[in-house]
Image (tube, helix red, strand yellow):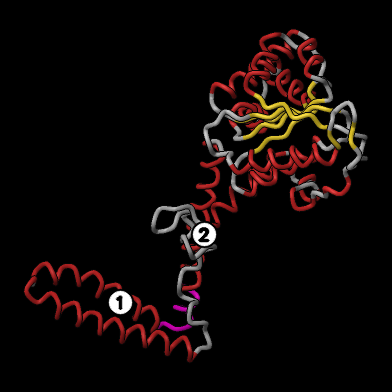
Amino acid sequence: MNDDKLREVFIKYENNRDKAKLDLEMRKNKVYNKIPQMKDIDDKIFQIGLSLSKSVLMNENDRESIVQKCKTEMDNLKKQKEDLLNQYNIPSDYLQIHYKCNNCKDKGFTSDGSKCECLKQELIRDAYKISNFSKLIEKENFNTFDMNIFSEEKIDSEGISQKENMLNIYSLCESFTLNFNQDNGENLLFYGQTGVGKTFMCSCIAKRLLDKGYSVLYETSYNVVELLQSYRFEKNHTYEDKRNYKLLFECDLLIIDDLGTEMTNSFSISEMFNIINSRLINGKKTIVSTNLSPIQIANTYTDRIFSRISSHYRFLKFIGEDLR
């Protein structure tokens, strides 16, 4: 996740803490108006807390007795508060601060410094929003993958059946997600005819990684070029324009679908190379899906692009008849 989004998340947490404190003050004022004694008790508890430190510093030899005396006084005052709350049928936690997440007290991190589950879920929810995959992955993921839809009939030209081929691809893609955090330079290129499972497999990988908290961006190659043209040649950019442009280079996984359907010209080829090359240099992983064969890719794009892809991507061929 980029720094701008993290700042947004932490500002949200800060706002949650501020709201919790404000809500507590409002509840206190309601109780004080209804039960004036309650404010007197809270004031006494506050004064005892202030005087404790001073008394200990001035009488170090009597530290334990002073602390014990203050504790006894505070316990008695707290008991009086509980009795008053019961008397007026007010919930016992009414005068306590109410965080959205009590585990981290709306800080995002627990006392041992690790990410709280609420923060993990917040980051995952945001990753889903920006992935462009949110609706698709609800029905297309590893849990809904049905190997039985693939033919077991051997394809002579391939020397393997569609089902056997998909089992191999499935295994390699699961391995890709399991080892995603490793600096192994692994990228994937899916190629084959329309309707043989390429986009479905992209969706499976995307959901698995999104659920682990990685940022994933899915775009067709046509949309990638449109976004780049807009960013390069238009002056006024919205926050989303800037964010989506940065994500092309910075997201944990970029999925470029339907490579070859975009208008290919010097600009689009140059920009596509820039994205692919920059992500390789920065160790960011990419999946490219296309109906083009490796030879067609080489003929359509520059030698530079094909060289980078052929050297740094694992080619996975999807075979068989259209399943749709």
Left or right position of 144 against 254: right
Segment colored magenta: 29-36
Percent x, y for residue 52?
20, 72
Amino acid marked by disc 2:
Lys
Residue wearing tag 1? 45
At x 46% / y 55%, what residue is drawn? 107
Q: Secondary structure at mark 1?
A: helix
Quadrant of residue 154 in the image? top right
**Cα–Cα span, label 2 and label 1:** 24 Å
Percent from the top left, x then y, of residue 304? 66, 10
Dot 1 surroundings within 10 Å: few (below 14), some, or many (20 or more)?
Answer: some
- Mark 2, other Cα within 10 Å: few <14 / some 14–19 / many ≥20: some
Q: x and y percent of residue 242 in the render?
A: 63, 28
Name the residue beneath numbered marker 2.
19
The three-letter code of the residue at mark 1 reads Ile
Number of numbered labels in the structure image: 2
Who's the residue at 45% across and 54% down the image? 109
**Residue 164 - label:** none
Residue 15: x and y, percent? 52, 53
Tell me, yes or no, whether the highlighted magenta stretch contains residue 30. Answer: yes
Left/right placement of residue 123 relative to residue 87 reads right
Q: Is residue 152 magenta?
A: no
Which is more toward the observer, 41 or 233?
A: 233
Closer-to-camera residue (204/62): 204
The residue at 34%/81% (across/down) is: 41
- The quarter of the displayed image where residue 192 is located: top right
Most common SS among magenta residues: helix
Which quadrant of the structure image shows residue 289?
A: top right
First along the sequence among labels 2 and 1:
2
Front residue of 194 and 316: 316
